[in-house]
Image (spheres, rainbow, N blue to C red):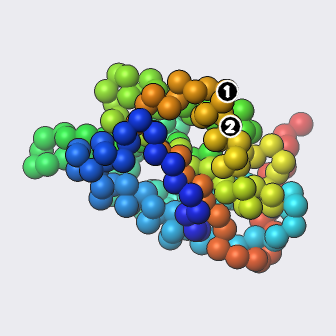
Amino acid sequence: MKITEIRYYDGSFQKITKLGLSALFLEIQQIFLETKIELEETKDANGAAVIRKLVDDEFSKKDEWSKISAGGIDWIKKFRYNRTLIASIGVEVQLSARSDLLVRDLVHIRNAIQDGTIEVGVIVVPSDLLQRFLPDRTPSFKDALRIFEQEFPEAQSYPIILMAVEHDGAGKALSKQKRKS
């Protein structure tokens, strides 16, 4: 995948550098860059769950990333020096759900920051271009900006990074999930 845009809120960039989280943030970017996605470049032609699974598979291959199955941040990694915990970073991957669930992700990150589980949160969404080729309710970077800056502006008072990703190029359509009846 490609990373097309990054927005930093409430000193998140400075916090990453001061707390020694730069390598972890680069690792997050590397995970997305190593996830190869080609899809049919036709409106609503692809399923997004396949992309989410591929991203989760890449996180799973890396050392010490913890996945929270439900009700929390998707992925967390702790930075340690010797055996001492220095800081943690959390990642919410919002590539396959409804755009209104971005607020839920913000709440997860806010709560984790407030209770000291993480120091910085990252939310990853499809770029505006990628979103066109996914189901219509999938979020886009534009949707995330609207939520962050207009509908839920208090999100800007937390050290959160918003990152947009895009597919690598044209290919076959990604299968859509079948709805359970």
User: The N terminus is located in which quarter?
Assistant: bottom right
Q: Can you tell which mark lies on residue 151?
A: 1
Residue at numbered disc 2 = 146
Residue displayed at 81% across by 71% down: 40
Q: Amino acid at mark 1?
A: Glu
Where disc 1 sits, the SS reads helix
Q: Residue 60: where, in percent of width, then height?
A: 45, 56
Residue displayed at 19% across by 41% down: 86
Residue displayed at 66% across by 49% down: 141
Q: Nearer the viewer, residue 8 or 73?
A: 8
Where disc 2 sits, the SS reads helix
Query: In this picture, is 25 found above or below 86?
Result: below
Query: In this picture, is 104 found above or below 47?
Result: above
Residue displayed at 67% across by 27% down: 151
Check contact, mark 2 vs mark 1: CB within 8 A. yes
Query: In this picture, is 36 found above or below 69?
Result: below
Q: Amino acid at mark 2?
A: Arg
- The quarter holding residue 61 reads bottom left
Label 2 to label 1, Cα distance in Å?
6 Å
Q: Nearer the viewer, residue 17 or 32?
A: 17
How many residues crowd mark 2 within 10 Å: few (<14), some (14–19), many (20+)?
few
Q: Residue 140: where, in percent of width, then height?
A: 70, 49
How many residues crowd mark 1 within 10 Å: few (<14), some (14–19), many (20+)?
few
Position of 129 with respect to 55 (left or right) is: right
